[in-house]
Every structure is written in C-alpha cells, then in structure tokens.
Image (tube, coloured by chain):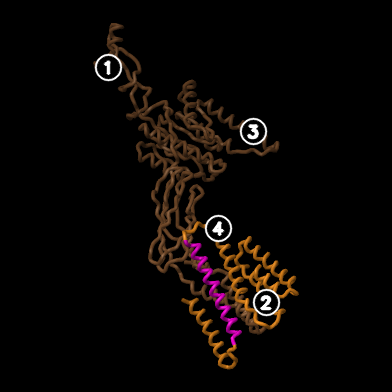
Amino acid sequence: MTRLDSPRLVQYGALAASALLAGLVLGRVELVALAAPFAIACVVGAALARDPQVTGTLGLARERALEDENVAATIELASAPGADRVDVLLPLPEELRAPEGNPSAVRLAADRSHAVTVPVRCDRWGSFVLGPVLVRARDRLGFHAWETSVGAPQPLRVYPRVETLLTMLAPLETQVYVGNQVSRTRGDGIEFADLREWDPGDRVRSINWRASARRGALWVNQQHPERNADVVLFLDTFVDVRSGARGTLDSTVRAATSLAHRYLQRKDRVGVVSFGGFLTWLLPASGTRQLYRIVDSLLQMDVVLSFAAKGIDVLPPRTLPPKALVLAITPLLDARSAAALLDLRARGFDLVVIEVSPVPFVQPATDELSQLAYRLWRLSRESLRLRYEQAGVPVVEWEDGEALEVVLEEVTAFRRYARPVRA
Amino acid sequence: MGVVAYASSREPTLAPVVATLGAFGAVLLLFVLVRGDADLLGWPLCVGAIAYVLSLLVHGSGIDEAAPLVAAALLLCGELASWSLDERTHIPAARGLVASRAAALAALVGAGLGAGALVVALAAAPLGRGLAWTIAGAAAAVAAVALAGRLSRS
C-alpha cells in the first residue's frame, strides 16, 4: 500500500520545536507548555503509523443486465491488523452510476472481513469492466493514509432494452427454409393463394370441390408456403451525432437490437454489418445464440474515425445473401455509406433505409451564416432522400423518442404503393 | 479566536496588535479551509501562537497558568480544521466512525492539556535547582526523542 502522511505532522513538529527553542532562549516555561500538546500529537501520530494491509475482492451479482436495472457489486475487505477507517470507491464509467454507497467509509476489525455492497444502476447499454476498487485506509486521527486498489476487474454487459414490435417488415422474397413468413410463391402451406385446374399428380385433398362443382371440372387450391427470410441489419457507424446522453449511434443500436430480437423470434436468419471506420460483420443465422452474438457485437460498436474510401466490395459475399432484406439504419451523414447503399440497391437487394435523424441533436447558431448553412444542410439531406426514393428505396426518418413501429409502418405503406422492381 | 481574545484581555496595551494578528490568522485559516490546502494549515496556528507569545512577553515575567489551555485550544483548532479538510469530499461513513474520531481527538487534546499543565506545575513547584535536575531534564529530553523515534519505526 502507498503511504501518505498528513502535512500537519511536520507542521506540528516544527511548531513544537520552535516553541521549545523560543522557551529556552526567552526562559519562558509557558512556551514549553505551548509546545507540549503538539509534541504529543507528533508522538501519537508516529505511534499510529501501522500499515493496515487491506486486501479485498470484487464480485458482481450478475454479468449481464438490461438498461435501467440494478446490479449489486459486493466488495469484501479484510485487514490483518485492523483499520480504523477505510474509504472505498468503486470507479464507474459515466454510463453506470451508484445511487448510494459509493464512496463509503467503514471500519475493519482485525482478521475479520467486511462486505460493502454498492448498487450499480445501468443507465446505458455497453460492455464495461468494473474495478479494481480504490481503497484508502486512515488512522483514527487522520495522520496517515494508505492507498491501494483491490479486487480483480469484473466484466458487466448491459443490454439495450428491446422495443415491442407488433408488425414487422416483410421481405419481398423469402428463402427456401420453413419459417413464419408467408411467401409470395405458391406451394404447400396454409394461406390460400389461388385456384388452378387439376393436373395429374395433384393430391385429392387439394381439390376444391365447391369450385369444381361450379365449373364442371376439377380445380385445386394453391397455397402460399411459410418460409423464412434472411435479414441483414446494415448499420452505419461512420459518424455519431450526440447531444448529452443520446445520439444517433445509441438509437441505431437500440433499433438493431429490437429488430434482431423480433426477426429471430420469427425463425428468420439475421446478420449484421457494421459499416464504418472499423468494419465488422456477422453472417446471417437463426436462434437464440445468434441473438446473443448480435447483441454482444452491438455492445462493442463504436465510431472509429477513418478517411479510407470504402464500398460494399470490402464485405465478404456471404454477409449479403441473395434475396435478403437489407435494413439500413443510418444517419445519412457519410457519403461512403450513402453511396454503398445505392450500390446495394443497384445490385438488386431489397433495401430499406431507416434514417436515424441527426437533426434533433444539432443546434444551429443564431447568426445568419450558420442559419444559411443549416438550411443548406437540411436541403442536401432532402436531396439525398429523393435520390433513394427515385431508386425505389423506401427512406423513413426516425426521430429520437419516436416509436420504431411507426417507422416500420411507414415503410410498409411506401412498399404497398411503390413496389420496387428488380434492378 | 479564543486565544486572541485571551491574549488581548491579558495585555490591553497590546490589544490592537494582537487583534490584528488574530484577524490575519483567522483570514489565513479561512483561506486554508476554502482552498482546501492542508499544507498551509500550520501558519494560522503559528500566527495565533505569536499573538499569545507577544502578550506573554509584554505582560511580564510571571508564569501564565492558562498557557496549557492556550496550547490545547490551538491544537484543537488545528485538528478540527484538518478534520474539516478530510471531510471536504463527503463520504457516508459507517455508524461510530465520527464518534470514534471525536473521542480520539478529545483524548489527544486532553493529553496535550495534561502535559502542558504538568510542565507549568513543575515549573511553579519549589523543587530547587542544581546539576542533578539539569541531568534529569536532559535525560528526559533524550528519552522523549528516543521514544518518538522508536514509535515512528514500529
């Protein structure tokens, strides 16, 4: 432990020595009496200088938590000779906070451990490492302090809250595996699709007897099969526009988590592409394990500044399977991601752009030039949006605080009236 | 302030000087507390002690029986100021920690008061003079220094 001595020990010593010397020179016993308490304080201070040898461990009640949940951090402290006062501080990142009990001061009895419990509130998602704990032991009068850090660092993953989504975007084309998505093709399924004349080989149970009786020939029912879909969440991580605790990257991660969770519930395969200064991807897969993989990768997501020119050519081919629904979540601020999305559309992908609006996070200055720049910036965004719409890509603006479901409903409405064609 | 008031009342002719010194010491103490600089804590105590010593020198050669009280008051002032600086960052403490420090502080000041009173009492006692007393005093001083050194090493 690192020992720190209070400066007043030296000051008291100097005061006592000066008074004693003055008492000798002036021949006044009162000065000796004046020096006596300070000399005694120095002696007591020297007697109290015993290293308390504080040791400790740090433990978390859980390694995973949701936003707005509390996780108890328990700090076990022990001291062989005992410590009169031990200040304990668990350093926390700004996304986490302790409503109470951090820092705190306790007394440690000799050879007995003492547990300090700190409730940690998770304000924002992220992957964090808590610890080590900073400990400062002091003697009873505060003449000496010993500082050290105890406890091994503990990982804590805070997952973003999942928004309830009742309706989801249906892809234009489905895959060949069984799922919950009603395919536009015809085959064996539940949903009625059409009638056609009977052909040799058709099963008897598919004959529609009512239609056959009316038309005087055998007619059979056709159904839409239930298939799964491939969904790729294309996240633009070139830029993050922030205002306080909120930002576009924050909204992007929340939306991606909610969408991944819901699509995986429907037995679809979901993949993630983080397209930014640091390129990461997860190949489409289904199941709970994939959900955890996705959320864990989202927790690591951060904006990395890069000036490298990047297109979708840098992506491995399997990250964007054919007929996949590509949901791009982007603030539409970086020209590289805007161009990459148009490139995706040109290659025939079923693309939907959810624009995480940076406008609420930008406060323009009041002078005329800044206002002009702000209006030009808004116009350029409108122009970019128009380019996407001309390419048949639905673009919906998602503002901070708005429900994601409303945005998805807008896309559904767009696709209902403006069906994109294969490029 | 008590020390300054006592020193002023003891020697009224010196009251303006003592009061000025006392005010300066108080301002210095306030500065130390506001700034949170424990390195300067000795200076207000020093100024208070100087104010007392001035009144002591001007007053005459008689022994002032209140000297232990003055010394204890100065020590108490220094300790309370230091405690205040320690508590600048509020840390919720377990029950009994504050009482424990207060008790230790009271014991320290009490011991200081007792030691000062012993010194004054011994000085006032008609014990005589001579080589034996001088040797005894020197031995006591050496023993005190040795004890302090031993304690600081352990």
Name of the residue lying farthest toward the bottom = B131
Specify the quadrant of the image occupied by residue B13.
Answer: bottom right
To the question of a shared chain for discs 4 and 3, the answer is no
Q: CA distance from mark 1 to mark 3?
A: 61 Å
The residue stretch that appears in magenta:
B96-125
For discs 1 and 4, the disc positioned in front in the rendered view: 4
Label 3: element kind: helix
Left or right, A76 with reference to A239: left
Q: CA distance from mark 4 to mark 3?
A: 49 Å
Q: Residue at x 50, y 50 (%)?
A: A93
Which of the two discs, 1 and 3, labels the residue nearer the N terminus? 1
- Return the residue at label 1: A206
Q: Is residue A108 visible?
A: yes
Q: Which chain is brown?
A: A
* Quadrant location of the N terminus of chain B in the rendered image: bottom right
Is residue B104 inside the magenta stretch?
yes
Q: Which of A169 and A26 lies nearest the eye of the viewer?
A: A26
Marks 2 & 1, CB-CB < 8 Å contact = no
For discs 4 and 3, the disc positioned in front in the rendered view: 4
Q: Is residue A201 visible?
A: no
- Return the residue at label 2: B53
- Return the residue at label 4: B89
Q: CA distance from mark 1 to mark 4?
A: 80 Å
For discs 2 and 3, the disc positioned in front in the rendered view: 2
As drawn, A128 above or below B125: above
Q: Residue at x 25, y 17 (%)?
A: A205
